[in-house]
Image (spheres, grey):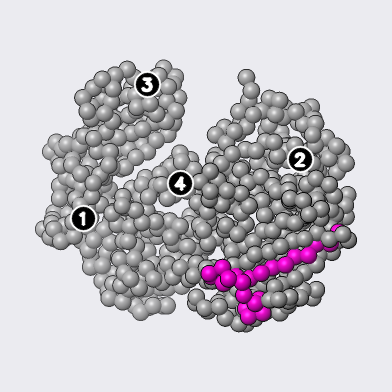
Amino acid sequence: MMNAQKSKIALLLAASVVTVALTGCGGSDGNDGKPGEPGGEPAGSIHKLNLDITKVNYENGSPVVTVFATNEDDLPIVGLTNLEIKKALQLIPQGATGPGNSANWQGLGSSKNYVDNKNGSYTFKFDTFDSNKVFNAQLTQRFNVVSAAGKLPDGTSVPVAEMVEDFDGQGNAPLYTKNIVSHEVCTTCHVEGEKIYHQATEVETCISCHTQEFADGRGKPHVAFSHLIHNVHNANKAWGKNNKVPEVAQHIVQDNCQVCHVESDMLTEAKNWSRIPTMEVCSSCHVDIDFAAGKGHSQQLDNSNCIACHNSNWTAELHTGKTAEKKAVMAQLGMSATLAGQEDNTAVLTVTVFDKDGNAIDAASVQDKIKRLETITNVGPNFPIMGYNPSPVTGYKKVAKDLVKDGALQDGVTLVDGKLVFTTPALPFGAGDTDTAFTFIGLEMCNTGTTLTACTADSTTTSMKADLVFGTKSSNAPSMRHVNSVNFSACQNCHSETFEIHKGYHAGFVMTEQVSHSKDASDKPIVGVDACVTCHTPEGAGYSGTGMALEIRAHKTHAEKANGLIGDNCTQCHNDFNLDAFKVKGAMEFNKGSYTTPITATCTSCHAPESIGHGLENMGAIVNGDYTQANQAAQSETCFYCHTPTVADHTQVKM
């Protein structure tokens, strides 16, 4: 098959070659050796395994590949036993298999046949390539090298490592390749080194196995990477084994294509997704279309006519327009608020609406366009004392109040000089932290395209920038919760900057500089997640009967729903641990009606109590006890006498 197409492929290559500089071709410079060649003493420990292909040549059309292995200190590693070239492939150019078809990788073989050269380098040979394939030196060649986790002969532990490098048919940098998404983008959600699925830890390995050829050969079009990857990141249909559904991933990215499709100088075909539309890719999201039957689309038996209608600019606009539109709507309005405690223990909340230039406007002028302006008020930012449900001690629960809903001003809300004003019921003000009340504000607007429009029953809506305001009864400076454990920038790495938190049940909260109250060393506002504790309080189990405290809920949500993404790597979310924060915390309702001391509640939100390895009660903890018992013991836990958790190692113990 390949011989018959050689001349056609050569012409296509000449017409569509893209030059790319391949990083890493020279390999490590080594120590005490010639540049590009290994040398020096071998590594004694391996915390990180780096792999690189330093040389490719060909003998009778079969590649001979030299792989160089080093540790984190660039020392050569000798004695690897789990090394393999998982896939050797060549790239069939766009259109070579039929008009309109995208470029696709063709598998040629794999190899576990290598010689350890005892200097950090390993030489692979292939006994045979796939007998049905013909090596073509005109095509880009790819080698996917994998080393499974294991041990060296002397017992030294070796972590897993994967890498992919592309070459031309002579072992030089390739003239063209197909790189649309990057491993670096995937690791904004998926932890570096944690398996993504099967045993693969890098997207390039996934791509090297899940080829169109692989899918066609099994009669399973849904397992080709370009189809599969969209399936698992949107909620349009079930996929894979055991009817796994991608609802979690879809909720994370909210159909924002640009979360994954990030352009880069290193991605030679970053725009391929819009430039070369195919039935195989489009049907992964547009599941109501049957191209062969002409259902939902004009009948298409192949990809030859796709580009006639779906030109690159239009395709890109359709798929990025939703996100661009959302950003444009969000930019049109902002909010600012004040909160003032009163002698009768109420607090007056005043909300001002701003235009895109920061000028105050009359809220009445946009009132009919407001789907919902929601406020949630609590007392005590460091340890809120108003429960998600009524507190068994104070009897108070958070004050949730819509100021505007479906374009209508709500009861108890007035317009004063164009500002929305609401007086809360009496709050449980006290001394110290409880002298401060705080309000989290969400705004949801109705829009048609990028234009704000009067709300109707079927209006499209967009959540706007949220706001956070503090106020005291004493008129002293307010107390504020720390924001040095989790910054929302970490959340944005995975969720994107337009993520509308809890939209649906709530107005939706978009975390921006409007909710910041601290700045970093470069004077940039720190957007924390402290506003969330207005609702995610220590007291009051939620609708599921489990604890609503931010310390519990955030961990449980990411452990139960996103554990496959983050594993147990705290750095995916945390930039630090503020252990001193526990000094001002008390009992947390872990399950409905039962309370746990704060450190233990936080730890057992991920770890089952029995898995920690010793009796928690012996360390001063109360697990699922009553409120008074757990609250009195809150500062008696001795966990930090032995445990000194850090972001890099949350299991660290004092020695």
The amino acid type of the residue labelled 3 equals: Ala
Q: Are marks 3 and 4 in contact (CB under 8 Å)?
A: no
Dot 2 or dot 3, earlier in sequence: 3
- Distance between the alpha carbons at the discs numbered 4 and 1: 27 Å
Magenta stretch in the rendered image = 345-367
- Distance between the alpha carbons at the discs numbered 1 and 3: 39 Å
Residue at horizontal 80 percent and vertical 51 percent from the top: 435
To which residue does mark 3 refer?
43
Dot 2 or dot 1, earlier in sequence: 1
Q: Position of residue 363 (x, y in %)?
A: 66, 76
- Distance between the alpha carbons at the discs numbered 2 and 3: 47 Å
Give the class, few, some or many, for how many residues have Cα within 10 Å of label 2's Cα (few <14, many ≥20). Answer: few
Give the class, few, some or many, for how many residues have Cα within 10 Å of label 4's Cα (few <14, many ≥20). Answer: many
Residue at horizontal 76 percent and vertical 41 percent from the top: 585
To which residue does mark 2 refer?
584
Element type at mark 2: helix
Q: Nearer the viewer, residue 508 or 252?
A: 508
Q: Position of residue 481 (x, y in %)?
A: 69, 47
Q: Position of residue 301 (x, y in %)?
A: 30, 72
The amino acid type of the residue labelled 1 equals: Val
To which residue does mark 4 refer?
187
To which residue does mark 1 refer?
18
Q: Nearer the viewer, residue 463 or 220?
A: 463
Q: Please determine whether, in this image, residue 336 is positioned above or below residue 430.
A: below
Q: Residue furthest left?
A: 7
